[in-house]
Amino acid sequence: MPAGEAQRIVIVGGGQAAAQALQSLRQGGFTGSLTLVGDEAALPYQRPPLSKGYMKGEVEQERLYFKPSAWYDDQNIELLLGTHVTKIHRASRQVQLGDGGHLTYDYLILATGSRPRPLPVRGADLGGVHDLRTLADVERLKPGMVAGRRIVIIGAGYIGLEAAAVARQTGLEVTVIEMAPRVLARVTSPVLSEFYAAEHRRQGVTILTGVQLSHLDGIDGQVSAAVLADGTRLPADLVLSGIGILPNEDLAKDAGIACSNGILVDRDARTSDPHVFAAGDCASRPLVHFGRSGRLESVHNAIEQGKLVAAAILGLPRPVEDCPWFWSDQYDLKLQIAGLSQGYDTHVIRGDPASRRFAVFYLKNATLIAVDAVNSPAEFLASKKLVMSGAKLAPGALIDTSTPMKDIAAQAAA
């Protein structure tokens, strides 16, 4: 089908990528049938605040929604919420719904997101054991977030540490356990790991690294303790599992669409079926600034791919592919990340971590590939452009805080 001639588009999913695709399609001039099918009963909503402001009670549920219900009516968008897609019939271009109904499409957009990795231990099904991925997950968790109660968090990634910060600020006794030798081991350098571990300990969080969970014990069906492989018992009123996520690729895989740790897509977010696109956490995409492919679990990625899908369907020029970026809020620390640091051979610290305002730059063959900026927005913003341009930088120039980042970026561009 030639670009721009689609009349029926179906989107499966209710997160950031789906919301962006809807908005970009309508803004781009698509006037045909547009249907969103979402597993959850809620309007499409933001997920990052779930482990931050929403869990703390600082953000109302209505503020999570991308758009109010009236917007979908105004845009003539059909919402099928609380509805599950069970199968894709590629030959007839139909999706089968859980109630037995079918939807026909010219193009299908899979924005199915991801799901928490199951906790593979005895006792994971006890009451008081939680995941943190959906609005419903937080609603189940929040009643137990009471000052003086004890929570054990399994996994010291961003979600685990963000939840630890909220729990501690709420007055809970918090213990974080991590199999790796340091916190944030999969995503950042030892410098940042040590900084965040020290901050959490300063706030009263107990952090145990290099330990393995054996099982969970319970009393009358309710969790009472996390038991480590060495026999250590950690009393717990609540347990939160944050051991990573898995892409929701089963629907695509069952339909014969190419998948490998995510639904494989090209630069336009098109799958191996030219009538099916995939965007967001579920998609494995070309990472054009890094010469490889992979999944990006971020708001930026979901927004960007939603725009890419809409442009491809409408026959519009491909939007510029930005440098990947992420963020994490813990206590009064805003961490902003530009680029992907995996594979770096040199790192440079700009500023003093003790000041709680610094940045760690990651270089490979003298080329800047990423930065972790803590309370340092200038370093973050400049680094996004530098990563995209493949700038080569002298470590000494980055260390010198007397030279503003904008000047360093200008010199690199010259």
Image: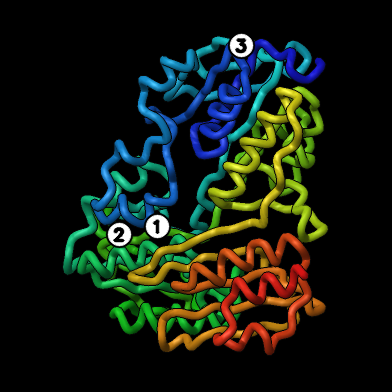
Query: Secondary structure under badge 1?
Result: loop
Which residue does the image show at 63% across and 36% down from the upper left? 307
Residue 318 relative to residue 203: left or right = right
Q: Which mark is residue 32?
A: 3
Residue nearest the viewer, comparing 70 with 123: 70
Q: Is residue 379 shown to the viewer in this render?
A: yes
Instruction: Identify which amino acid the numbered label 1 is placed on.
Output: Gly
Q: Position of residue 194 (x, y in %)?
A: 49, 84
Q: Residues within 10 Å of mark 2 (few under 14, many from 20)?
A: many
Q: What is the distance, in whole Å, between disc 3 and disc 1 at their CAs?
A: 49 Å
Pointer 3 with pointer 2, Cβ within 8 A: no
Dot 1 or dot 2, earlier in sequence: 1
Instruction: Identify which amino acid the numbered label 2 is placed on.
Output: Val
Q: Quadrant of residue 397?
A: bottom right
Which residue does the image show at 29% across and 60% down from the upper left? 238
Pointer 1 with pointer 2, Cβ within 8 A: yes
Q: Residues within 10 Å of mark 1 (few under 14, many from 20)?
A: some
Q: For the N terminus, which image quadrant?
A: top right
Q: Quadrant of residue 385?
A: bottom right
Instruction: Identify which amino acid the numbered label 3 is placed on.
Output: Gly
Q: Position of residue 160 (x, y in %)?
A: 43, 64
Residue at the disc numbered 1: 123
Dot 3 or dot 2, earlier in sequence: 3
Q: Which mark is residue 334?
A: none
Which residue does the image show at 52% across and 23% down from the upper left? 37
Q: Quadrant of residue 235?
A: bottom left
Q: Position of residue 331 (x, y in %)?
A: 33, 70
Q: Nearer the viewer, mark 3 or mark 1?
A: 3
Q: What is the distance, in whole Å, between disc 3 and disc 2 at their CAs?
A: 51 Å
Query: Secondary structure under badge 2?
Result: strand
Q: Which mark is residue 223?
A: 2
